[in-house]
Amino acid sequence: MDRPLRVLIVEDSEEDCLLLNDVLARGGYGVTYRRVETAEGVKAALAEGNWDIVISDHRMPQFNSLAALKLCKELASNLPFIVVSGSIGEELAVSAMKAGAHDYIMKDNLARLVPAVTRELREAESRRQRQSAEQALEQWRRRTESILDAAGEGICGLDAQGVINFINPRGAKLVGWEAGELIGKPLHETLHHSREDRTPFLKQDCSLCASLRDGLAHWMDDEVFWRKDGKAVPVEYTCMPIQKDNNIAGAVLTFQDITERKEADNALRESNRRLERSLTELHQTQQQIAEQERLHALGRMAGGVARDFNGTLSKILGFTELILTSPEKLGSPEAVRDHLRMISAAAREGSQVVHRLYEFHRPRRDTEQFKIVDLNTIIERSLLLAEPKWRQEGQTRDTPIEVRREMQPKVLVFADEAELQEVVTNLLSNAVEAMARGGILTVRTSQDENRATLEISDTGEGMTEEVRHRCFEPFFTTKGDCGTGLGLASAYGIIQRHRGEIQVRSEVGKGSTFAIQLPICSGQQKQSSHQGTLAAPKDHPLRVLVVEDEPMVREMEVEYLISDGHVVETAGDGSEGLRKFRASKFDLLLIDRAMPEINGDQLTETIKKINPDMPVILVTGFTERPGNGHGPHRANLILSKPFCHATLRKAVGQVMAAI
């Protein structure tokens, strides 16, 4: 493709002009040209056009190349100018070159024209780039000088000997000099010769001079420079070395007056001392208040526990007394069975109180087996369970409750399904109870990349600010004797154990919204959720050693095991249990955790050292939920008291199926 070329041709011969155009076209240029032959024509063409090059004949009737060259230098100094002539002497050609022509070519040797044009275009472009760079450099220099002049800190240049060769007006003013007065003076001897207490500051100890020796940056945040009038100026400075050809050519020093900062620091230190005293007093007051609150909470919790357990014990003692003091009832197996059922139910209620109280604070153990559950499925199941309650109450009071679902499809979380359903059911029940005059119950689910969100909203009575702040406290209830105060406390503990959050928004007369956020399941969790399934328990009789220091509990465990067909031997403490274990062979050990002298953990560890494969169930009364132990010397399973026959049978089956 032809290279475009705009040529101004100064020539009186149209024929010669066409010849030049033809030569350039054959050389690969797409030529656009204009022919002029007078000074006025040159001026007009230069004023109107954007030319790439000027080609001029030397001698014309009214004009010549030297006059044309002079006009080009005046009006377009960067344009390449080539003289093309049929008759020009050597002396005249030299004069043209001295005047600024870039080349001259004889008309009988036009083969040189295209290379000359190409060369001059390239050099013209280089000249333009150089001029542009020089202009940019000059602008940068002026801008830099303006910035340095306007800078809020002192900026000083040093040569390799530490002599000042530049300082901005701000820097000179900070030390009380004129900028010109400091040029050529050694910085250390002029500004940095003494410490604040006026003791001499030797040059070899000066960090400014150190940059010129070691080639490293040095920074000081609390030194002094000395003003021309002899006063000290507290300064902060940084000295950066300048490298040239692997040698230290000098340094750049930036510094600023820190008088105001030091005064502010002193004032701040004094303020901090006063604040520290105030905080100490406040902390002591807070500790006193916290202690009072703790005692108040403990008293309230103790009252709640006492109330619930007194109710439970009243049932147990009452029905037990009826059996023991009514001989006629002993003759009726059905009456005895009914009373025993009541006693069992009351005992389970007491156990549930302890369990729900423990759920409030119990952390999640690594051994707990969570699985993938669909949050929407749990909600629908809980709504189905709660539906009879709100429908019945709505029909009785003629105050219907409308349920609205705003649920994102398939919201998967990693959770204990039963625990999560307990939380949702409890929140739904509370929402229904809060809408005594009917209203709207709204359930929403959504999820993002990391969290799933469940919101349960009602349009009921709402809560005061005090109730909202205390609603998750154990045994705090607004229902009087009808409530235990453990529902929301248990829900709080369950959500915390799921590494989630539960919050409540409420306003009196406008209802409440409980918002739960849970981590969504990851790929690793999905994989793990399919693991850990136990095989069916072995059903053949086992030789079991029961180690329990409480006789009644030991007798109950023995009865449970014997009724399942197992052969049982007992020990009343850890020492006896270890002796019997060493003296005989057993298929399974059932060990109490809290025993004097040798406790269950110590006994289990010792037994596991003797026989790492020996199955051990550790029984505890410290509200532990059933779960696998940790490490090579721990129990295969932990079983919490109280437990029933079926629970023990299941635990035995799980342990024996896993070996």
Image (tube, rainbow, N blue to C red):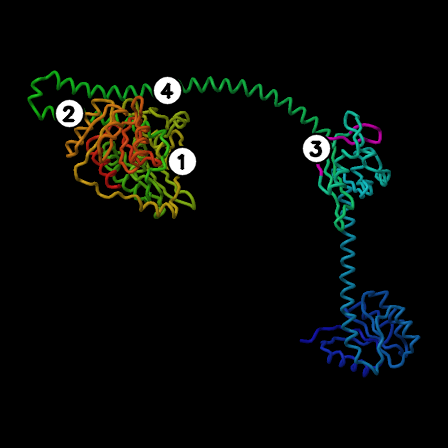
Q: Which residue is mark 3?
A: 221
Q: Earlier in the sequence, mark 2 or mark 1?
A: 2
Identify which residue is drawn at 77% across, 28% down.
195
Amino acid beneath label 2: Leu
The residue nearer to you, when weighing 109 against 71, is 109
Does any portion of residue 150 appear in the rendered image? no
Contact between marks 3 and 1 (CB within 8 A): the answer is no
| Residue 540 x %, y % | 17, 39
- Marker disc for residue 298: 4
Does any portion of residue 575 appear in the rendered image? yes
Q: Earlier in the sequence, mark 3 or mark 2?
A: 3
Principal secondary structure, stretch drawn in magenta = strand
**SS at mark 4 in the image:** helix
Q: Which residue is mark 1?
A: 501
Q: Is residue 447 left or right of residue 193?
A: left
Which is more foreground, mark 2 or mark 1?
2
In space, the residues marked 4 and 3 are separated at their CA atoms by: 54 Å
In space, the residues marked 2 and 4 are separated at their CA atoms by: 34 Å
Q: Earlier in the sequence, mark 4 or mark 1?
A: 4
Identify which residue is drawn at 86% across, 65% down.
74
